Every structure is written in structure tokens, then in C-alpha cells.
Image (cartoon, coloured by chain):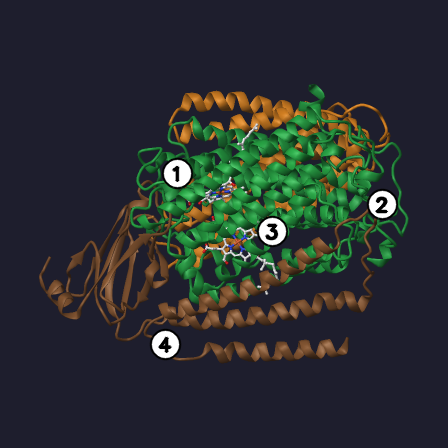
Chain colours: A green, B brown, C orange
Amino acid sequence: MKEWIFTTDHKRIGILYLVGSIAAFAVAGIMALLIRVELSSLGPTLVEDASQYNVWLYFHGAAMILAFLIPGLTGFVANYCIPLMIGAHDVAFPRINAFSVWLFWFAIVLALLTFVIPDPPDVLWTGYPPYSVQTDGNTAFYVFTVHLLGFSSILGAVNFLCTVIYMRAPGMGWNQLNVFVWTTLGAFVIQLVMIPVLASAVTLLLFDKYLGTTFFNPENGGDVLLYQNLFWFYSHPAVYVILLPAVGIILEVLATFARNPVFNYKVTVYGGIWGTVLLGSDVWAHHLYTSGMVDWLRIGMMVTTLLISLPVGLLTISLVGTLYKGSISFKTPMVYATSTLFLILLGGLTGIPLAMTSLTVHLAETYFVMAHFHYIMGITATFAVFAGVYYWFPLMTGKMYNETYSQIGFWLNFIGVNLTFWPLFGIGIDGMPRRYFDYQMYPEFESTQMLSTVGAFIVAAGMAITILTWIHGAILGEKAKPNPWGSKSMEWTHCEYPPGPGNFPTPPEVTAEWSPYNYGKHTAQSL
Amino acid sequence: MTIWFRVVAMVSAVALWAVPAMAEGKPLQDHTEHWNTLWHHVILDMTAIAVVFAAITIWFLVKYKRTSEDQEGDSPSLSFGASMAWAIIPIFLFLADDFYLAANGWKLWNDQRQVPENAMEVKVTASMWSWEYEYENGKTSEDLVVPVGAPVVVRGSSDDVVHGMSLADFRIKEDIMPGRITYLWFYPKEVGEHVWTCTEYCGLNHSDMYNKVVVKSKADFDSWLGTKG
Amino acid sequence: MASEEAHVHHWEWSYYPLILVAGIFFAVPLGFAAFFVYGSGLMSALFIGLGVPLIIWGCAGWAGEGIANAENETGWALTGLPIFIVSEVLIFLSLFVSYWMLRLTAPEWPPPGSPEIGLGIPIFMTILLVSSSFTYHIGEERLEEGDKAGFIKWLYITIGLGALFLLMTGVEYTHLLGEGFGFSANAKSTAFYSITGFHASHVLVGLGIFLFVLFPALSGKISHVFVTGAGIYWHFVDIVWFFVISQIYIW
Ligand code: HEA
Ligand code: HEA
Ligand code: CUA
Ligand SMILES: [Cu+2]
């Protein structure tokens, strides 16, 4: 026990991240079910007024983004895999790593306290002032949840940048890194540079509410839009903190199950990944198209936002191209990964009308936006995490999950999410506003809302089965064969199953031909 | 290779020229119709892209299914030229599309922001959780009542927190907040009723903060406005 | 811990990260919320009373382990710190940007009712902070020459200068608050207290770090990486001060 709770080993820390982020996902998912039930019929359904609803929605949004996806991707997968992929015995600062994971766990505890404290936070995950300053709700807990998670991520960024810079196996050049390592570096650069901005935004909120300063109070020289700018300055790039590692995982899975190298490696890395990091950092104001800010800024932001389709398009081409002339087998990780090839199109391409200021003046704050981000984030990125869990499952546990039940879980999830979110595009275009506890003005949307609720329960069944296959596999699964997928990547070829303390029985060294994608006749030079 | 560079250069030159050219033009009397048109174009465009990518994906998934356990992938190595072509050509294709979208988006945006000179002014005040409209003659109202056939501009600010003015039927919205004056305008074409909703989260009764937009005939409107309330 | 013998067959672990996080959790979010949100000074005192000892225990234990083992003697820590400082720079930058936004959009500046803030104290504070950077540097040179006692002496002086700096902040605040220039007075007070306060909190953290250099040093344990790192941080805090004084006091 002691060696688990107080562990400083990156693999165990990774698993602690996994457990924490899946717990956050389950609770936030249950909140989503409550939300869906509430919306399934006109008028109050589950609760009398919106006060409960707003707390559920606060928890759902904040936890899904900040406590499930970001820690799941940059905490769990990065921690577990990066040292193994680069041939290191651990991360550069193991104790700081342990510090990060516990900051994350305590942030979840703080967020969970929402359900038991009086006057819970009701500011939703965006926390816009003046409402967040004027409300009786506990805005302080919102701020500190962000602080704890932010601090955790910044330290994670420092840790992983140092790890990849200094601890690669002897002989391993930059172009021999797994694509996933690159996506994580990109994500951590964003975290390092952008989180401080979010942290100061919410800190100023704290000052305004509790110490009486007037940053966001126009009656005393403040500016309402200042907060929104600072907030989205981080929170837009944050979507690429999610998207990049998600794409990284999908590429790893596709490469392994198609037995092909990642398509056009250098362009993917230097154009796709770093292009996304660069462009993604200067488009934040597309969340402010209807905020009343100056007109010229909206035009500039429209153009830069549209340009995001270039690097993300390159990444999409790599995803599809990796399949070309492959040898594709459809095990559960691959099934999740291939489904994301379609979902990323739905989610990404619906971002394009949103990027156009003139269309967004109608679409903003409607269910269209909500369906957009559920497709790209709530489904594509979430499925990427699931693909990752299944993919590395034999490595992490040394055991095998049950293939049949996992596939059943997948299909329930896949059908369920489409049933839940696809109809919502439609009522979004017809004007259904977000964050509505009730929709008396639009009674005609009731049947669609009901349909969506049915879908959500199908997802719930699929998710429950999925999580059970993990628990079952980890405890009772059959022993896995070494390297069951036949991957060429270092975490599979050089480790024990599962890897023990210090990771590698003998510290690995690589030649100039070696690459994690040495399939067929390929060498590092031919990528 | 060189031929591709030429194609790319031409496409981008056309695109660069097209942006300002398409963005010119006179202010409209009605931007709602144009929203619908642009929307359909964009959705067609996005559908086309999605179909192309999805079709190729499905094709690959079917065609390259593993046939025997020890089969390896057989993807070709890209030469430097091919590798760059796979970056540059798609980029310029996407760029061309982006410019097309940007130009059209920009043009409509100008229309949405340029209030026609003959627009009727209505002052609006938002507060948790209700709206108040005030007309030029001092009359106030809880619903937005407007005459048919002339543009209306609604302008104002909020007494407390950020709210959103949204007219879904007219495809327009803008937030409204303390310390700033914001506006939106629209063109009521027919007599009838529409919904006006609050679209920025403002606390407990956010979803109850809606009311009606009543479009009356000119005569009905005048008599409504004349009767002091 | 296993850096050199990667193949040792036991799992690495440490108590202190978790203890430190627990301390932070009680002292900061719970302590703050108990007082400011729920108006309970007693609860707040309890949480802080629980949290602060945990924080000190965690830091002390961690520093002890860190100094005792070789991992920290790699150069990585000295790369990690500047990377971390990048994010600190951005925090200050966003505070300054907020300040510029408020100031440049204000109809008049300073807003009516702001007292004149004298330059005397800030100039004196500048002298204190700059000389503390020098004294620390001298200390490091002594250490280089193997003169541990000299290092400790100059470290004391540095800490003294830093503490005096904080004291002067206190003096200035009391003076301004006495003139009725409270936090909520106007946009200027907002920016002034936030930025100077935030900088002062960094000075405080810097002093804390120095204490964790000092105590082991008194018993003869000196980690060169730790000493250099503390210095880098201190110089950073010093440089930020120049932005504070030029933007807040002089402009
Ligand atoms: C993982 C998360 C994620 C990702 C990756 C994205 C990706 C994108 N998002 Fe999304 N978005 C969110 C999560 C995400 N978003 C969230 C959470 C919100 C709401 C926040 C809130 O208010 O609560 C939001 C809201 C949001 C808005 C604001 C809407 C509003 O409230 O008014 C906008 C506007 O521009 C936008 C646009 C985009 C664009 C252009 C992309 C692009 O990156 C997409 C790029 C991808 C493609 C385009 C598809 C692949 C490319 C090709 C096939 C090439 C060819 C294509 C072309 C030439 C067009 N998003
Ligand atoms: C990663 C991001 C993510 C994910 C995965 C989801 C998943 C889901 N979301 Fe969420 N959502 C957001 C991010 C996400 N959402 C955000 C950011 C917002 C905006 C918030 C705001 O406006 O502020 C939002 C808002 C939002 C709304 C809008 C409400 C409103 O505007 O009023 C709705 C409504 O339907 C909704 C529904 C759902 C549903 C049904 C799912 C389902 O897919 C959920 C499925 C999951 C489960 C059902 C849990 C399953 C787990 C178990 C059953 C446990 C089993 C346990 C064991 C066996 C041990 N979400
Ligand atoms: Cu007013 Cu929402
Ligand atoms: Cu965005």
C-alpha cells in the first residue's frame, strides 16, 4: 500500500491519474444523465428550479475538461508511456511528479465538495464576471480547483520537458520519437505558457469577489470583457492540449494495428503538431464573437481560426494515410481509433461555421456549439483515451481484457453518443440556447430532447460495460502474451510485462535505423 | 513538383485577390436571408470535405484488412518531394477554401454590423431576469413590439451581469453587459411573433429570461406606440 | 532515487509530496473559503493551523531527502527551474496586461481620489532588493571557494535584506490604507495592491526557499544545485521588481 500511495514511480503515478480521471468522468457522466433527465420533458422534471441543475452543469463541464480529459491525457498516458517510449528509467523529477498527481486528486476532492457544501459554486465552467462576483455561490472553490489543477499541470510540463530533453535512450534522435511524445510536448508547451494566464484570470476573480478589487467591475473603472479575454486565452489553446495527445494516441494505435509507420512523420510533427500549437495560441477571441468586443478583432480572429484547419487537416491526412497499404486488424483499441477518424470530421468541420463570425452570431451559445464540442471533445478525445486504455492494457496489467464485452461496450457507446448528440445540432440551428434548465419558449424541441436522453442512457450502459471490462480484466483477466499487438515501439519491445521498477532490465540503446515504426522495410531514415 | 508549385501559387493569388473583392458591397436591408444562404453553402462545403475523407477512410479500412496473422504493412517510403507535396498541396487547397469562407463570412459580417440609416431605435435594458424596451417617445414595454417592413436596431446595456440578446429567427445575437453599450439590428419582414431569449448564463432564472418579439402592421404599431403605457 | 542503479528491484516512494499537498489543501482553499465565504474565523484558523504545519513538515522532509540524494545533483533541476520561471513570467505578464487595459481605457489616470504615492519608499526598496541579489552572489562565490561559514554569513544578510523589503511593503501599505486608499478604492488601487502584493508574495516564497538552504547549511549539508536554483529564483524576483517599479510607481 505504502508503495502505491506514496509512490514516485511514473507508471504507478500514471495509474493513479487514470483512476482519478476515470472517477471524475464517471461522476461527471452521472451529472450528465441527471441533466438529460431534467431536459427530457418541458417544465421542471427532476428538480423544481435551476439551482440544482446549475450545480450539475458546473460539475459536468469543469470536471469533464479539467479533471477528466486533461489529466487523463497529459497525466495518465503521458506519465505511463513517455519514459517507456524514450527508454528512460523514470521522469526527471519523480517527487515533483508525485506532487502533481496529488494536487490533481485533491482538486477532485475540492470539486466533489461542491455536492456537500452550502452555497455551492454555480458559475459554470467559464465563471464569467460580474455574475461570478455577485453570486452567493462559493466562487472560491471554483478558483482553487483551477489553481490546484493548473499548478499540477505546470509542474507536469516542467517535468516532461526535462525528461524528454535529457533522458532519451542513448542514440535516440528527435526524429525517432513516437508521435505521441511529440504531441505531449506540444500540449505541455501550451500548458506551461497558457495556464498562468487562466490562473491569473481566476485569481483576479477571487480578488474582486473577496477582497473588493475592481478589475471586472465597470462601475469602478473595471472591464467585464477583460476576464473573458484572459479566460479564453488559455481555454481555447486548452482544446489542443486535449486534441493533440488524443491524436497522438490514435496515431500510435493506427500504426500498430495497420503495421505501418505514421504517414509523413516529419510533416506530421513539425507541420501538424507544432503548427497547431502556434496557430492555436492566437485564436482565443472566437469565443467572444457575440461578446460585444471591437469589430476588427472579430475579423482577425475569424481568419486565424479558419487557418487552424491547415495543421489539423495535416494531422487528419496523417491519420487516414497511416492506413494506406496497411495490414489492418480490428481489435478493440483499433475499433475505437477508427471510429474517431469519422468523429473528428464531424466535430472538427462543425467548428468551421463556428469560426465564421457572421454565422456564429446565430450559432453561439446554442446547442449547435454544444454538439460541436461534444463530438470533438466528448467523443473523439474521450474515445482516444479509451483506445489508449485498451491498447496499453496488456502492458499495464500484464493481463488481457475480454474482447467480446469490450466490443459490445464500444458499439453501445458509439450508437449512444450519436443518438445523443446528432439531433442536438438540429435544434441548435433552430435556436435552442445552451445552459437552459427549461425551454418553455421552444415546446417543439421536446421530442428531440427526449431522443437525446434515450441516447445518453445507451451511452451509460456502454460506459458501464467498458469500465467493468477494465476492472474485470485487471483482476481476473488471462495472462497476456508479451507484445500481443506486435508493436515495434520501445514500451512493448524492451520491457517486462508489466514493467517493473526502473522500467528496463537493461538500459536500452538504439541505433540510427531504429524507429518506433520499423514496420515492413522501413527504417528511421525512410520515414 | 514544379507544376504543383505553379498551381499552388495561382490558387493562392486568386484567393488573395478574392478576399477584398468579395468583401465590398452596400449594406443590406435584411441579413437574415443571407445568413441562411451562406449557411447552406458552408454546410455543403463541409459535407463535401467530410464525405471525401470518410470515403477514403472506409475504402482503406475495407481494402487493407489483415488477411494473415504475419502480414506486415506495405506503405511506400515517401521521397522528400512527395513528402513536401503531401504537405503543401493540401495546405493550399485548404487555404483556398478558408479564404473563400473568410471572404463570404466577412461580407455578411459587415452587413450585420452596419445599421441601415432608416432603422428604428429601441433602447433595451437587461437585468436579472427581465428585459425592458424603451421607445423614442418614452414608452416602455416588456415585449419588443416592432412595425413590419423597416429595420429595427436594439441598443442598450445591463444593470447587473452579462446577458445575451438573441433573436434566433433573425439569426442574430449579441451580449449585453454593464459598462458598455452593445446593439443588434434586424429586419421584420412579416407580421407575426418570434422569441427573444437570453443567451449568456446569468444565474438561477437564466432560462426564464425570454419574451416575445411582436411584429405588427404599421398601423397597428402606430396605435400601440401612441397609447401611452 | 534509483537514478544510477536503474535495475534495483524495489519501488521508489516518498511521504512528502502527499503531505505537502494535503497541507496546501487545508491551508489555502479550505482556510480561505472558511473565512471569506462562510465567515467563520474559527474554522479558518483550524484549517490553517492544520495545513501550515503539514506544509512545513512536507517541505522540510522533501528538502532533506533532496539534499541527501544524488538525483538533485544532475543539471536537470537547473533547466527545470527556468522552464518553470517561464510560466511565472506569464502570470506577471497577464497581471500587467490587465493593468494596462484598465489604465489605457480609463477616462483619466490616476482616477480621482487616488493619493500621491511617493517614490521614496520604492527607491529604498529597490536598493534593498538589488543589493540582496549582490549579497547572495557574494555568498555563492564564498561557497565556490569552499568557505561555508562565509556563505552562511552572506545568506543571513540576504535574508535580512529581503525581510526588510517586505517590512517596507508593510509600511507603505499601512500608510496608504491609512489615507483611505483601500483595495476597493478604484482601478488604481486594484492594480497597485494586486501587482505589488503578488510580487511581495514571491519575495516571501524566495525567503522561504532561503530558509531551506540555510537550515541544512547550518548542519553542514549544502547542495550546490539547490543553492544555484534559489539564486536564480531570487534574481528573477529581483528583475520583476524593475517592471513593478517602472510600471506602477514611475509611469
Ligand atoms: C477538444 C476540444 C476542441 C477542439 C479540438 C475544437 C476544435 C475547433 N473548434 Fe471548438 N470548442 C470546444 C472544444 C473544441 N473545439 C469547446 C469545449 C467549445 C465551447 C466552450 C464553451 O463555450 O463552453 C468550443 C467552441 C468553439 C467556438 C465558439 C463557439 C461559441 O461559443 O460562439 C468556435 C468558434 O470558432 C470553435 C471552433 C473550433 C474550430 C475551428 C476548431 C478546429 O480546431 C477544428 C479543426 C478541424 C477540422 C477543420 C477538421 C479536419 C480538417 C480537415 C478535414 C481539413 C479540411 C478542412 C477545411 C479546409 C475546412 N469551437
Ligand atoms: C470531455 C468532455 C465531455 C464529455 C465526455 C461529456 C459527456 C456528456 N455530456 Fe457534456 N458537456 C461538456 C463536456 C463533456 N460532456 C462541457 C464542457 C459542457 C458545457 C458545460 C457548460 O455549459 O458550462 C457540457 C454540457 C452538456 C450539456 C448541456 C447542458 C446545457 O447546456 O444546459 C448536456 C446536455 O445534454 C451534456 C450531456 C452529456 C452527455 C449525455 C454525455 C455522455 O456522453 C456522458 C456519458 C458518461 C456516463 C453516462 C458515465 C458512465 C459511467 C458510469 C455509468 C459509471 C460506471 C461505474 C462503474 C462501473 C464503477 N453535456
Ligand atoms: Cu439573462 Cu441569461
Ligand atoms: Cu476555441
Ligand 2 has an atom within 8 Å of the beta carbon of the residue at disc 1: no
Q: Is A37 placed left or right of A269 in the picture?
A: left
Distance between the Cα atoms at labels 4 and 1? 41 Å
- Depth check, mark 2 against mark 1: the one in front is 2
Q: Chain of mark 1?
A: A
Name the disc covering residue A240, or none: 3
Quarter of the image with the N terminus of chain B is bottom right
Q: Position of residue A133 (x, y in %)?
A: 38, 42
Label 4: which residue? B27
Q: Chain of mark 3?
A: A
Ligand 1 in which quarter: bottom right
Label 1: which residue? A54
Distance between the Cα atoms at labels 3 and 4? 37 Å
Q: Is B174 placed left or right of A525 in the picture?
A: left
Circles 3 and 2 on the same chain? no
Distance between the Cα atoms at labels 3 and 2? 37 Å
Ligand 1 has an atom within 8 Å of the beta carbon of the residue at disc 3: yes
